[in-house]
Image: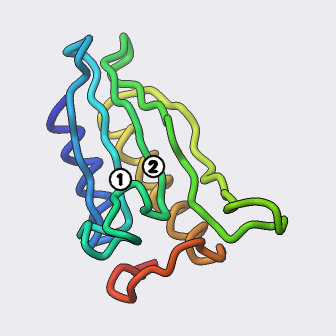
């Protein structure tokens, strides 16, 4: 499972080379791995130096499944400018679906999700200013 998690991390970093992806095991189960993806890889480039201010909010869990593996999306949105004057910020959802299958199927489907992330970022009015070196979409 760790190998598949590394494959998914590398697929993300291929599209966003200056981003960051962290892999951690579940505290309750050895069969689940969580992967968080960040558009801005250096915390000092984040707004106010806070990692959670990253405009991309993408977190998945990778679980062993009777058919191989299952991938679930827990956070899949980007922070955008508000559409109403009384909102603090807006949010645009990244289209992503739970899927299961062997490692190749999961990797292929996640690659499609990474492409959707790039398309969503390209068409959105982001809430935070993103330094140019991170704009690889």
Residue beneath the point at 65% across and 73% down: 124
Q: Position of residue 45 (x, y in %)?
A: 30, 76
Q: Position of residue 125 (x, y in %)?
A: 65, 77
Q: Camera-side residue: 35 or 53?
A: 53
Q: Position of residue 111 (x, y in %)?
A: 41, 54
Tell me, yes or no, if residue 15 can be seen here.
Answer: no
Which mark is on residue 58? Answer: 2
Q: Describe the colour scheme in one phrase.
A: rainbow
Describe residue 110's horizontal placement relative to residue 118 as left or right.
Answer: left
Describe residue 90's horizontal placement relative to residue 84 as left or right.
Answer: left
Q: Camera-side residue: 29 or 3?
A: 29
Describe residue 82's horizontal placement relative to residue 115 as left or right.
Answer: right
Residue beneath the point at 36% across and 10% down: 66
- How busy is the neighbourhood of tag 1: few (under 14 within 10 Å), some, or many (20 plus)? many
Please tell me in which quadrant of the rendered image residue 5 appears.
top left
The reply to whether dot 1 and dot 2 touch (C-beta < 8 Å) is yes
Q: Considering the numbered disc 1 on the image, is that residue within a helix, a strand or a loop? A: strand
Q: Which residue is mark 1?
A: 37
Mark 1 and mark 2: span between their CA atoms?
5 Å
User: Relative to 89, is 110 above or below?
Assistant: above
Q: Position of residue 69 (x, y in %)?
A: 35, 24
Q: Which image quarter holds the N terminus?
A: top left
Q: How many marks can you see? A: 2
Q: Mark 2 or mark 1, which is nearer the start of the sequence? A: 1
* The residue positioned farthest toward the left in the image shown: 3
- How busy is the neighbourhood of tag 2: few (under 14 within 10 Å), some, or many (20 plus)? some
Tell me, yes or no, if residue 107 can be seen here.
Answer: yes
Residue beneath the point at 57% across and 44% down: 96
Q: Camera-side residue: 14 or 34?
A: 34
Q: Considering the numbered disc 2 on the image, is that residue within a helix, a strand or a loop? A: strand
Please tell me in which quadrant of the rendered image residue 52 appears.
bottom left
């Amino acid at each position: 499972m760790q190998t598949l998690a590394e494959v998914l991390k590398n697929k993300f970093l291929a599209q966003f080379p200056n981003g960051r992806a962290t892999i951690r095991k579940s505290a309750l189960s050895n069969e689940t791995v969580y992967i968080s993806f960040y558009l801005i890889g250096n915390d000092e480039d984040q707004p106010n130096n806070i990692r959670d201010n990253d405009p991309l909010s993408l977190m998945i869990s990778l679980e062993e499944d009777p058919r191989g593996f299952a991938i679930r999306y827990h956070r899949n949105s980007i922070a955008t400018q508000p559409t109403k004057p009384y909102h603090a910020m807006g949010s645009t959802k990244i289209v992503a679906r739970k899927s299961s299958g062997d490692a190749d199927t999961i990797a292929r489907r996640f690659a499609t999700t990474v492409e959707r992330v790039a398309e969503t970022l390209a068409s959105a009015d982001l809430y935070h200013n993103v330094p140019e070196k991170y704009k690889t979409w």
